[in-house]
Amino acid sequence: MLALDGARAVVTGGASGIGRASCRALAAAGAAVAVADLDAEGAEKVAAEVGGIALVVDVTDAESLRNAVDRAAAELGGLSILVNNAGGSTMQGLADWSPEEWDRIVRLNLTGVWNAMRAGIGHLLAGGGGSVVNTASISGTRPSAGETPYAAAKAGVVALTASAALEYAPDVRVNAVAPGMIRTNLTSVLLDYIPDMVAHYEDITPLHRIGTPEDVADVVVFLCSDAARFVTGQTLVVDGGMTLHGAGVDGLYDRFFRSGSPPAG
Ligand SMILES: NC(=O)c1ccc[n+]([C@@H]2O[C@H](COP(=O)([O-])OP(=O)(O)OC[C@H]3O[C@@H](n4cnc5c(N)ncnc54)[C@H](O)[C@@H]3O)[C@@H](O)[C@H]2O)c1
């Protein structure tokens, strides 16, 4: 296991899914954790489980987020890790989004990450440095139709991560994770109610399964740890290889060569 003894972390969106798994994995590695979420009850529950503190925050509200992060720094004795993970979206055609929904999704997924970095990085610097991990998405690295504000915001997180890494090196490393299809509250509607969705994703994923929140949380811990000491500005895709597809000769090898039989004709 990677050691984070003495680390002090704030995780936004920590009450559920990837954020909750990250809180658990960071705590298991030795970090003290502040669980920051809109969902007060969920945050309290995770905080109690990991022996941390709960913060009720809306990441789109810069002022209240700053106050909450200041409180976390005061209670934990400083901060060395920020996991800026709160986010989510629905799907619609480009012209069908209302301006209000567009703004809400960009504010949640992009501005929320910026708000959290602005609130937290000063604390990391005051303690001599640390690590930031932002949650992007394969929607930002390989966008699909129907998710324009989310894809644009997550691509923005990738760029924000690289730009911040340049600004804050060498004291603070700034990286991102880009999860693929991970089973959480965000995706369970899709996976449970659309026929054949699970089989479809298992089929198109080279590692042949849907991801778990823990699959991403372990990468978050790695990026925060000393094992990633020479890694900054990167977005690490955690999708079981799903978005490797798309080449012109995709599937040819499996159909004609892997079995040992030559191509027909
Ligand atoms: N699940 C996936 O397949 C997947 C894939 C790619 C990216 N992601 C990203 O991973 C992150 C976590 O998503 P998840 O799948 O764990 O979803 P989730 O719905 O299980 O968890 C999201 C958490 O964020 C909190 N939250 C929402 N809005 C907030 C706000 N304004 N302020 C504070 N907290 C807020 C929610 O209360 C919830 O606890 C998101 O950024 C999401 O876009 C998820």
Image (cartoon, rainbow, N blue to C red):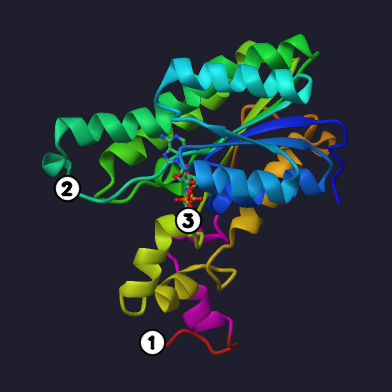
Label 1: how many residues lie within 10 Å, few (<14), some (14-19) or many (20+)? few
Which percent across, then down, holds residue 235? Answer: 58, 37
Is the Cβ of the residue at disc 1 closer than 8 Å to that at disc 3? no
Is the Cβ of the residue at disc 1 closer than 8 Å to that at disc 2? no
Q: Secondary structure at mark 2?
A: loop
The image shows a total of numbered marks equal to 3
Q: Secondary structure at mark 1?
A: loop
Which residue in the protein does label 3 denote? 243
Mark number, residue 151: none
Q: Amino acid at mark 1?
A: Gly
Q: Is residue 35 left or right of residue 114?
A: right
Is the Cβ of the residue at disc 2 closer than 8 Å to that at disc 3? no
Above or below: residue 180 compared with residue 225: below
Mark number, residue 93: 2
Q: Nearer the viewer, residue 4 or 153?
A: 4
Quadrant of the image containing the C terminus: bottom left
Question: How far, Cα to Cα, is label 1 from label 3?
Answer: 31 Å
Can residue 178 be seen? no
User: Nearer the observer, disc 1 or disc 3?
Assistant: 3
Q: Which residues are magenta?
A: 239-258
User: Nearer the observer, disc 2 or disc 3?
Assistant: 2
Task: Give the quarter of the image for residue 231.
Answer: top right
Label 1 or label 3, whichever comes before in sequence order:
3
Can residue 42 be seen? yes
Q: Is residue 126 left or right of residue 162?
A: right
Which residue in the protein does label 1 denote? 265
Q: Secondary structure at mark 3?
A: helix
Q: Is residue 260 left or right of residue 51?
A: left
Which percent across, then down, holds residue 218? Answer: 71, 51
Label 2: how many residues lie within 10 Å, few (<14), some (14-19) or many (20+)? few
Label 3: how many residues lie within 10 Å, few (<14), some (14-19) or many (20+)? some
